[in-house]
Amino acid sequence: MNSGHHQHDPNFTKEKKFYEYITNLPSETISKVKNKPLEVLKLIDNYPDWFMNIGPKKGEIITKEIRSKKPKILIELGGYIGYSAVLLANEIIDDLDAKFYSFELNPEFAKISTEVIKLAGLSRKVEIIVGKASYNLPLFKERLQSEKGQFVPLDFILLDHWKNLYLPDLKLMEQINLIAPGTLICADNVIKPGAPEYLKYLRYSPEEKKDYNLNYKDPDYPDLIGRWNLIYDTETIEVVNDKGFKDGVEITKCTDYLSG
């Protein structure tokens, strides 16, 4: 959900208008929603302009997964205006060891999500990392390693940025060992606008993956080789949203890796 969705409006007028709205709420609204994450989400759901957020239906599929997994290190690629960060960080609110990291390319959107997260009372649970994910992820890995005193893979990943980056960013995370058995990966909008290459890759056998990674070089990311030996269990869950559009969330669990 990065600026790729907003090419028709290079000035982000809709988002800027929302920023004005959220930073100038009447005091009675503030007292009703402050520090109540689900009330803040309702504000966005009921806002007159439609934003390409995860929304309540797809959100429920993902929160259910988080509840059963109880992840400690959660990231999203594509923070947009903060909806998913609030929705998902709300699930880890009582877990002192758990933290949600929101990677967002666009500083304008990061400014909005900072306000949304603050209003929801989740600033201590969410950190926004501004910039290109492919640049920031390796730095983030180093940082995790020094903070934890050992290497730790990610427990939960939400992909919700430009659809054509799902696969390169997945392969990058494979390659730098941020994905390991136990990692749960959820990807939004896999039907509309769709991420066919990503879905295909997840379903390759290790042999096919090895072959693909050796022979297909993405011109934008020539050094990406991924990790052929990670085993995924993956499923597309279809959802019809309030506007009547069919879309889907891909729920992927890294279950194992082959040695050799």
Image: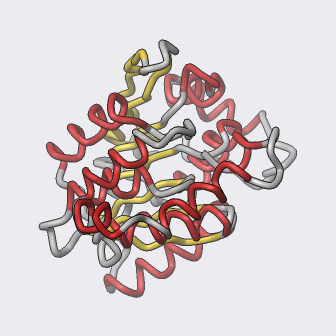
Q: Looking at the picture, does residue 236 appear above or below residue 211?
A: above
Q: Position of residue 205 (x, y in %)?
A: 50, 24
Give the camera-side residue of 120 and 136.
120
* 75 to the left or right of 9: left
Residue 124, picture quadrant: bottom left
Residue 146, picture quadrant: bottom left
Q: Position of residue 30 (x, y in %)?
A: 31, 66
Q: Position of residue 2 (x, y in %)?
A: 65, 49
Give the camera-side residue of 163 and 171.
163
Q: Looking at the picture, does residue 12 appear above or below residue 165?
A: below
* 217 to the left or right of 147: right
Quadrant (top left, top right, bottom left, bottom right) of the N terminus: top right
* 108 to the left or right of 206: right
Give the camera-side residue of 169 and 125.
125
Residue 121, picture quadrant: bottom left
Give the residue displayed 83% in from the left and 50% down from the top.
10
Q: How many marks?
A: 0
Give the camera-side residue of 151 and 32.
32
Give the residue displayed 32% in from the left and 51% down from the top.
87
Give the residue displayed 68% in from the left and 38% down from the top.
213
Q: Looking at the picture, does residue 61 appear above or below residue 241?
A: below
Give the residue displayed 49% in from the left and 20% down from the top.
247
Q: Looking at the picture, does residue 25 appear above or below residue 62?
A: below
Residue that lies at the very extreme toward the right in this rendered image: 219
Q: Position of residue 251 (x, y in %)?
A: 37, 32
